[in-house]
Image (cartoon, rainbow, N blue to C red):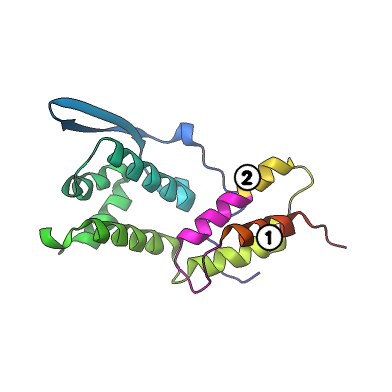
Amino acid sequence: MSAVKPCITYSSKLYISKIQKIKLENVIAGSLRKRGTLVFSSSNRMEGLLHVIDLFTKNASRIQLTNPQKWLIFENVLDKVAADKWTLQITGLTVHQKTVARFSQELDTFVQRYTGSRHPRDILLKFIESSECEKPSSVDPEIHASHMEVLCSYASRLQGTEPDLNDLNTKKKLFESFMPVW
């Protein structure tokens, strides 16, 4: 494996029950809508950031946050350091530039900066193919398969020169991770 470490490793464990939670709220036609969401902390590393972004996006849609509300509220689901980085990243954007597509693009840029690499997908895919991701004998096959699927899913979301993993390639990598060394 290369000297560069992947942004998510096989042994990463995200303990959702230990992550701080906040409520997202919005008033629609006089009715208050609320959804709980998680707050990213750097101690939760990359897996935590991706999980928080997914949950924020899903819950913002469920309570029908407007695009300007998403831009304003997103920093509330980040710890102080991450919120400062987000604010610095979007400083200078005009109201007209803060579109739905631009929000998605800025989230991708934010994730890439947190990985510390220009091509985090490539690094994570090499890691997935390495011996470090072979199924340990002490791990239940279903747990191993689930974790490998999560790693492959996250790899496809990261930026890189390698193509995204489709279902067939994910299954191939999963199968190869079970193969014993002869």
Per the rendering, the mark at residue 72 is none
Identify the element where label 2 is drawn: helix
Q: Quadrant of the N terminus?
A: bottom right
Count of marks placed on residues: 2
- Using the image, determine if residue 23 lies above or below residue 69: above
Report crowding for label 2: few under 14, some 14 to 19, many 20 or more residues within 10 A (C-alpha).
few
Region of the chain picked out in magenta, as a range: 148-165
Position of residue 171 measured from the top left corner of the image (x, y, whole percent): 66, 56
Query: Which residue is labeled 1 in the image?
Result: 172
Kind of residue indicated by mark 2 = Ser
State the residue in front, 1 or 67: 67
Position of residue 62 measured from the top left corner of the image (x, y, whole percent): 30, 36
Question: Of marks 2 and 1, which one's residue comes earlier in the chain?
Answer: 2
Position of residue 156 measured from the top left corner of the image (x, y, whole percent): 50, 60
Identify the element where label 1 is drawn: helix
Q: Residue at left 20%, top 58%? A: 99
- Using the image, determine if residue 22 lies above or below residue 89: above
Q: Residue at left 73%, top 40%? A: 140
Per the rendering, the mark at residue 146 is 2
Q: Residue at left 68%, top 60%? A: 172
The answer to which quarter of the image holds residue 167 is: bottom right
Position of residue 75 measured from the top left corner of the image (x, y, whole percent): 26, 47
The answer to which quarter of the image holds residue 143 is: top right
Q: Residue at left 16%, top 31%? A: 27
